[in-house]
Image (spheres, rainbow, N blue to C red):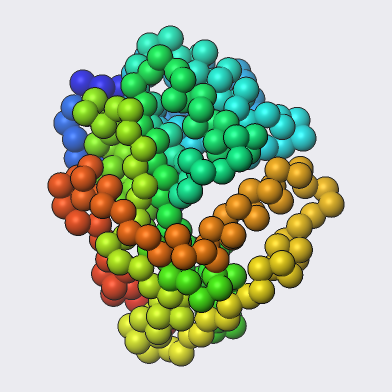
Amino acid sequence: MTRILVMGANGKTGRCVVEALSTREEAIVRCASRFETSASHATFDWELRQTWRPALEGIEALYLVKPASTETNPDVRDQMAALLDCAPELRRVVLLSEIDAGTRAEDLDERRVERLIENSSLEWTILRPHWFMQNFADPSFYLSQLKTEGRVSVPTGGHATSFVDTRDVGDVAAAALLDRSHAGKHYTLTGPASHTWADAMSMISFVSGRQFSYEDAPLEPYLAERASPYALRKFADHNRAVYEFLCSSASSAISEDVQQALGRPARTFETFVRETGPLWR
């Protein structure tokens, strides 16, 4: 049996990791969240260090999601290093990173955190997923705008995106948490095909019976609109790296890593849209 802590258990990928592990008899799963405490849930808050050690007590494998930088905790890498020091029984970690993180500047949080994990004594696997299909079904991303305005506006330069299903991210994470054959690997997680965002809107329109459109937003005004004089500089640097990649031809590249890790094809965007259709009606 492997005792596993899933961080961000209520988040997009965390809940999928929990779901994937729920069918595995060899896993004892503890969910980390800010407010719940029960036999299977531990209170965990990045801002409250006194919650770290109890949540990690007895944990052997960890699904790790980095926190956001804040004025009180500006150095994410050091914060995560301190967290790992609170887990003496930990032997395996699966880090949720981002697509293209391996090519980013070494001083950006994504790469600094990856380096921390790569240089640790733990068995590690790093997941680099592309844009989630589920963003189109999430009110905090595009669902609300689609339902109220009938459109989504994002800079892509007309390039296609190889969207990935969060359930595949969860399945790969679960496999890596339980099987050491995944140790030392970087998995770039995409779907089995790439689609322009205009094509994505056409598919959603067809399934939902409503007409949705896509507008290719100019990159610089889009970034400027989301900039804040009160935010740390690294937020602006991160946003630029994300959207510059989305506006490049590399965004359409298709990885076979889901197939390699799971022995089955990645879920398609068409399947996701068919299953989610009622949300957009």
State the residue in front, 66 or 217.
217
Residue at the far top in the pictured view: 88
Q: Position of residue 55 (x, y in %)?
A: 47, 22
Residue shown at 56% from the left, 43% from the top: 104
Left or right placement of residue 197 versus residue 261 in this view: right
Query: Which corner quadrant of the image does residue 266 belong to?
Result: bottom left
219 to 21, vertically: above or below: below
- Quick one: quadrant of the N terminus? top left
State the residue in front, 148 or 165.
165
Left or right placement of residue 222 versus residue 188 in this view: right
Query: Which corner quadrant of the image does residue 273 belong to?
Result: bottom left
Q: Position of residue 251 (x, y in %)?
A: 45, 61
- The answer to whether residue 89 is visible is yes
Q: Position of residue 161 (x, y in %)?
A: 43, 66
212 to 257, vertically: above or below: below
Left or right placement of residue 148 versus residue 168 in this view: right
Residue at the far right in the pictured view: 229
Residue shown at 71% from the left, 32% from the top: 74
- The answer to whether residue 17 is visible is no
Residue shown at 30% from the left, 22% from the top: 3
State the residue in front, 196 or 271.
196
194 to 42, vertically: above or below: below
Query: Which corner quadrant of the image does residue 19 belong to?
Result: top left
- Quick one: quadrant of the C terminus? bottom left
Residue shown at 35% from the left, 56% from the top: 190
Q: Position of residue 243 (x, y in %)?
A: 59, 60
Q: How many marks?
A: 0
